[in-house]
Image: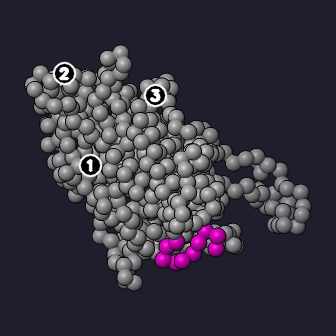
């Protein structure tokens, strides 16, 4: 797959060596001489007057007393420790990114100083204003009052070691399959610090993550992953699809392995202690604090990045090595968070990869979901092959809200058709129907504007080429539900279809494709 070979990868066989003696503020490397200019900290040497003039003239405090500065090099900028360091040191986080890109084994020992009051303020304004509050009960609007004083105090606590992570507030939300997902809502100050840490760490790990990793990354979205998958299936010799899902991934992350993975790149013990505090903060359940021994709370700002780092070492690098060493034929891979899709030419290699993948994940305390992990025959020749064997049409698989089906164009060419998952669509219709009945006594214009926002938001994600027919049936059901709620406003239902059609035409968004064809967007972003 074109996007999978953008970055090189390797297997980490051991935990990196502990930081040697040398003080803080330096980036450690296996070759410190060759990479002396790739350090993460900045060269801060204050400019001060020369003492020579004081000894010669007998004036011990010429600068304090307002006298002319002694002659010498005091008017010049301090020289950097190495010639190549001047450019890197002056760029802050950009210098960290350059160093991380240049040397994939470089360890950074000074990163906390990049968390500045300015970055904390930027992180605060990057948070959602209407987000749920944590155990502290502080809202975004409350914290904005006296923001600069609060940030200065928070910055001081971080750098003197007085910062303490608060436990998260547990919230249960319903899932599409009827189950509930436990979310951990962190306090506002924890969110701010986590957002700042994510900004710093992203400069390093965005240079490490492989091309087939799409979840929670800068400049990458779910549709980018969907495009890469479709292009890979259509352009490569793919006959079998492995749809893999890790069971309770965020709840099963091993803390010891998490910190070991971080130590491959991060040698700043202050950053590692911060992350350790967030991992072990736990949750408040029934008014009692419950400490965490494993996992990272879903809903925390830092959790998506930690999940990507964990899977980068536990799965992604191993996948890259496996297909280079053991694959026969072309292998495609697309991962979004804990959901992954792999494509193989032969069934034997697909089953070999599945067995090896299960063993690999077991080393790090992870297992595949038995019901959601499936190996199916899928691809350009799947329909004809199954027809010769007297079997039904090729099976389908779900990925990122779409059901992927083997189909053909009007010209008879193979294509992958994406349809909205029926179960999720029906759940959405039921939610809209219930809300329309609750709002039935509100003015039509108010309900219409609300419905327009909801339907338009749904179409912005699901309106892809080939899916308009299913979305059209969904919009018909929504129109019927809206008319039904309007007719229940009184004992004398009077809402003929002619009148309602004018109302629906005014407020319902038009049905059209909101996304280009996958090939167009994929090749445009990779050329």
Judging by the rendered image, the residue that carries numbered circle 2 is 384
* Residue 137 highlighted magenta (yes or no): yes
Instruction: State how far apart marks 3 and 1 are (Cα).
Output: 27 Å
SS type, badge 1: strand
Q: Residues within 10 Å of mark 3 (few under 14, many from 20)?
A: few
Point out the image quarter for the N terminus. top left
Q: Is residue 357 visible?
A: yes
Q: Which of the labelled discs sits on residue 68, or is there none?
A: none
Q: Residue 181 at x, y = what percent?
A: 34, 63
Closer to the eye: label 2 or 1:
2
Chief SS of the magenta region = loop
Q: Is residue 394 above or below residue 194?
A: above
Residue positioned 33% across, 65% down in the render: 180
SS at mark 2 in the image: helix
Question: Mark 2 packing: few (<14 Cα in 10 Å), some, or many (20+)?
Answer: few
The answer to whether residue 109 is left or right of residue 213 is right
Q: Nearer the viewer, mark 2 or mark 3?
A: 2
54 displayed left or right of 22: right
526 or 317, nearer to the observer: 526
């Amino acid at each position: 797959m074109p996007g999978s070979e953008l970055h090189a990868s390797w297997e980490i066989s051991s935990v990196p060596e502990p930081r040697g003696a040398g003080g803080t503020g330096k980036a450690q490397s296996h070759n410190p001489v060759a990479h002396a200019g790739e350090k993460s900290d900045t060269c801060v040497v204050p400019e001060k007057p020369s003492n020579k003039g004081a000894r010669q003239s007998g004036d011990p405090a010429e600068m304090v007393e307002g006298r002319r500065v002694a002659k010498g090099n005091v008017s010049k900028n301090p020289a950097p420790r190495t010639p190549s360091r001047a450019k890197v040191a002056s760029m802050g986080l950009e210098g960290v990114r350059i160093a991380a890109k240049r040397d994939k084994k470089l360890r950074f020992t000074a990163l906390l100083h990049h968390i500045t009051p300015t970055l904390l303020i930027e992180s605060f304004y990057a948070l959602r204003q209407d987000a749920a509050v944590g155990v502290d009960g502080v809202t975004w609007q409350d914290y904005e009052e006296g923001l600069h004083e609060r940030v200065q105090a928070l910055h001081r606590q971080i750098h003197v070691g007085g910062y303490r992570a608060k436990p998260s507030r547990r919230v249960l939300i319903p899932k599409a399959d009827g189950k509930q997902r436990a979310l951990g809502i962190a306090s506002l100050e924890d969110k701010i610090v986590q957002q700042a840490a994510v900004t710093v760490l992203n400069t390093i790990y965005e240079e490490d993550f492989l091309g087939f990793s799409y979840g929670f990354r800068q400049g990458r979205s779910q549709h980018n992953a969907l495009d890469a998958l479709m292009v890979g299936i259509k352009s490569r010799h793919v006959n079998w699809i492995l749809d893999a899902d890790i069971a309770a991934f965020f709840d099963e992350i091993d803390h010891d392995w998490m910190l070991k993975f971080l130590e491959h790149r991060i040698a700043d013990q202050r950053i590692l202690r911060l992350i350790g505090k967030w991992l072990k903060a736990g949750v408040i359940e029934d008014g009692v604090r419950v400490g965490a021994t494993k996992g990272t709370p879903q809903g925390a700002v830092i959790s998506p990045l930690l999940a990507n780092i964990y899977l980068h070492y536990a799965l992604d690098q191993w996948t890259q090595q496996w297909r280079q060493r053991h694959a026969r034929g072309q292998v495609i891979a697309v991962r979004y968070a804990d959901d992954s899709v792999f494509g193989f030419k032969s069934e034997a290699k697909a089953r070999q990869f599945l067995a090896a993948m299960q063993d690999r994940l077991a080393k790090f305390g992870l297992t595949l979901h038995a019901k959601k992990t499936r190996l199916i025959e899928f691809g350009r020749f799947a329909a004809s092959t199954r027809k010769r064997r007297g079997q039904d049409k090729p099976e389908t698989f779900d990925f990122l809200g779409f059901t992927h089906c083997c189909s053909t164009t009007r010209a008879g060419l193979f294509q992958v058709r994406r349809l909205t998952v029926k179960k999720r669509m029906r759940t959405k219709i039921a939610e809209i129907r219930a809300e329309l009945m609750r709002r039935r006594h509100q003015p039509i214009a108010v309900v219409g504007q609300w419905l327009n926002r909801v339907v338009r938001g749904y179409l912005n994600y699901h309106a892809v080429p080939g899916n308009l027919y299913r979305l059209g049936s969904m919009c018909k059901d929504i129109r019927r539900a809206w008319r039904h709620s309007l007719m229940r406003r009184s004992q004398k239902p009077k809402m003929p279809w002619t009148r309602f059609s004018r109302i629906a035409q005014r407020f319902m968004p038009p049905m059209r494709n909101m996304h280009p064809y996958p090939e167009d967007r994929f090749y445009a972003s990779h050329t």
